[in-house]
Amino acid sequence: MRILVAEDDPVSRKILIKTVEAWGHQILAAENGLEAWQLFQQENPKFVIADWLMPELDGVELCKKIRASETSGYIYFILLTGKGQQKDIVEGLQAGADDYLTKPFDIDELRVRIRVGERILNLEKELNSKNQALERLNEQLETLAQTDALMNIGNRRAFYETIQRVHQRSCRYPNRYGIIMIDIDNFKNYNDSYGHAAGDEALRAIAATLKSSIRCSDEIFRWGGEEIVLVIMEQSLEQTLLAAEKLRGAVAALEIPHKGCDRGYMTVSCGAAAFKENCTDKEWETVLERADQALYRAKESGRDRVCAGETGVPSNQVPPKQHPAAEK
């Protein structure tokens, strides 16, 4: 263990250094309190033994400065003093010292007190390690609590937390955001034809593709069943429609065979809506409802398309061109 020793008397300092080094510790030596403070800032030792009466900066003031510093971890501080009255001892402990020894000190007593400090620092280190492990575990649990296990994207709980935060911020500043509702076309038919295992694999593939096709600032969640909802940050309705069209195309490009679809491969329908910057939508549910209604119109008007939440007009007026894989 590294121990900072601050002692202005050369003889006492030499004896202290040799004694403590003989017990296997590494010593940082300072001739006065100011030098000790500078060493402490540079080396950040966890153990300090300092004389009370020193030039430049005495031991009590050094202790106060160390306690007030923004150092990581606990610092164990032993104060050496020729003052033996109770009021002096109380003053030193009130300054933040953990322990004290009256001079001239007994070597065996010093060794015992250093061991006490070591045990305390080791316990603090162990506790910090366990706390960090617990924090990591809590973070993992929180992530699991907000993640859909099948699709590996956010779940509905995570969506609620995100959309409330986004909507409140957008109302305040104001900012824009878009919502895209996506539904996999004829998915029940796919499960019936190919089996639920294949259906789960298709859900995972589509979720991964959608996730990789959005910006880092955007968010994706499983709404339920085969429905997915996305929150697109800082986007107008027109930009949200373009994003939805990109996502629709990305799923089609997977070419997941689906004999129950007209095009011969799996497709999705999308409904897009955007929050109005003038904050006429007081609740985020209004924006979501418009996106959901647009999704319904996209399904009703032929699937594999994007509809806008405010106008209901498909963004791709003409049904998508037959994919080459479906023409075979």
Image: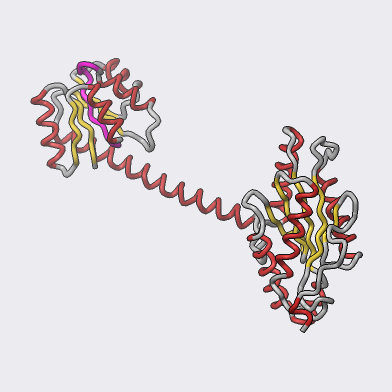
Indicate the quadrant containing the N terminus: top left, top right, bottom left or bottom right: top left
Residue 223 picture location, percent across and down: 76, 58
Q: Is residue 211 above or below residue 97?
A: below
Residue 326, quarter of picture:
bottom right
> Is residue 115 on the magenta stretch?
no
> Is residue 54 on the magenta stretch?
yes
Residue 323 picture location, percent across and down: 77, 74
Label count reads 0
Q: Please name the residue shown 69% across and 67% down the image.
A: 206
Residue 79 picture location, percent across and down: 25, 25
Q: Name the one closer to the observer, 261 or 69.
A: 261
Give the residues in magenta: 45-56
Does residue 172 appear to the left or right of 83 in the view shown? right
Does residue 219 appear to the left or right of 95 in the view shown? right
Q: Is residue 108 above or below residue 92?
A: below
Q: Please name the residue shown 26% across and 31% down the image.
A: 48
Q: Residue furthest left?
A: 11
